[in-house]
Amino acid sequence: MPSVPGLRSCYAKVGRLVYFGRMLDKIRLHAAGRLPASYVATLGDAQPYVLDSRCCRFLGVRYADLRDRTLAGGPDEELLAWAHARGTVRSDDDCQMWNHFILKLGWRDERSAVLRQLVVDRGLAGRPIETIVDQVEYEEGRDPVGDRAWEKI
Amino acid sequence: MPCVPGLRSPYAKVGRLVYFGRMLDKIRLHAASQLPPEYVGNLGDLANPRFMDARCCRFLGVGHAALTARTLAGGTDEVILAWAQAQGRAHTDEDCDIWSMFMAKLGWRDAGSEVVRQRIAQFGLSGKPVATMFDVLDYDEGRDPATDRPWEKL
């Protein structure tokens, strides 16, 4: 899947969190009928291992509520503030740990086998992919290893 | 530093948490004057917020001084962890998984990577497949995480 217009990198931060902005992008694109079909299956919090689910559990908000709030309008920062006010209180430490947890997912953990299969299935063999986020980034035409994207968060 | 008797690997878990048991070992060894001096500077939660004792205490929501006092009063690791969890912050299983994974991967692709490089040189670990701070500690103390793959048992 090449770059999807309007869908930002997993590394992009809103407030203290990576990935959150990408989740908002997916919500908005889906509502506009512009989210590619291959992304729709991993939308939301129905499957516990997908990144949307992990982000919603960390925030302590239900995906359906976040979707409704997002589509009601407002900038990313306002939506994050809404989620923080409604959900679980998180310290800066919590957010830093969660960011690293998400960005390193797939390296030396229970998702490593899934990642190896994804690399094959998506035709990404030969790329220096070590995490789930690497796989997403390479699939959308970015180069997180060349850019050392983790050094900028 | 070769193997320190009574000091377990940071990968070893007590309850839902890596590292906590090692922190208790350090407290007990220090009280018994059996903790090597190289480790004493890293004890506790006051010297540097990035030290692992400090990270663990912040996560639990207990001070290292209080944890030290409770540990030296006696009891099993599990009893002391239960005390810490009752005194401090409540955590879900997922919070504990995130923390354990964060700790076990610290030093790989993060602000600790430079420290890992420094420790490899300082501890004479060049040529070992060291990727994280836990790897540094394990190799330095004579364990072989690349072969044992302890992260697969977390």
Image: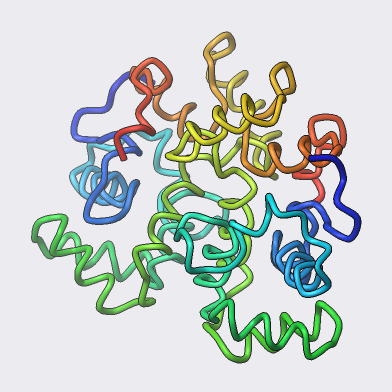
Horizontal arrangement in the rendering, residue B51 relative to residue B17 (left or right): left
Residue B79 coordinates in the image, percent (x, y): 80, 86
Say which residue appears at 71% left-offset and 25% top-offset. B124
**Depth check, front residue: B70 or A12:** B70
Horizontal arrangement in the rendering, residue A15 relative to residue A99 (left or right): left
Query: Colour mode?
Result: rainbow
Say which residue appears at 57% left-offset and 60% top-offset. B99
Q: In which quadrant will I find the N terminus of chain B?
A: top right
Compared with residue A37, is residue B77 higher up or lower down, i.e. above or below? Answer: below
* Residue placed furthest toward the left: A74
Compared with residue B131, is residue B22 higher up or lower down, i.e. above or below? Answer: below
**Quarter of image, res B40:** bottom right
Residue B57 coordinates in the image, percent (x, y): 56, 72
Say which residue appears at 29% left-offset and 37% top-offset. A35
**Quarter of image, res B121:** top right
Say which residue appears at 22% left-offset and 55% top-offset. A15
Residue B105 coordinates in the image, percent (x, y): 60, 43
* Residue placed furthest toward the right: B5
Horizontal arrangement in the rendering, residue A9 relative to residue B49 (left or right): left
Residue A78 coordinates in the image, percent (x, y): 13, 64
**Depth check, front residue: A89 or A42:** A89
Compared with residue A128, is residue A37 higher up or lower down, i.e. above or below? Answer: below
Q: How many marks?
A: 0
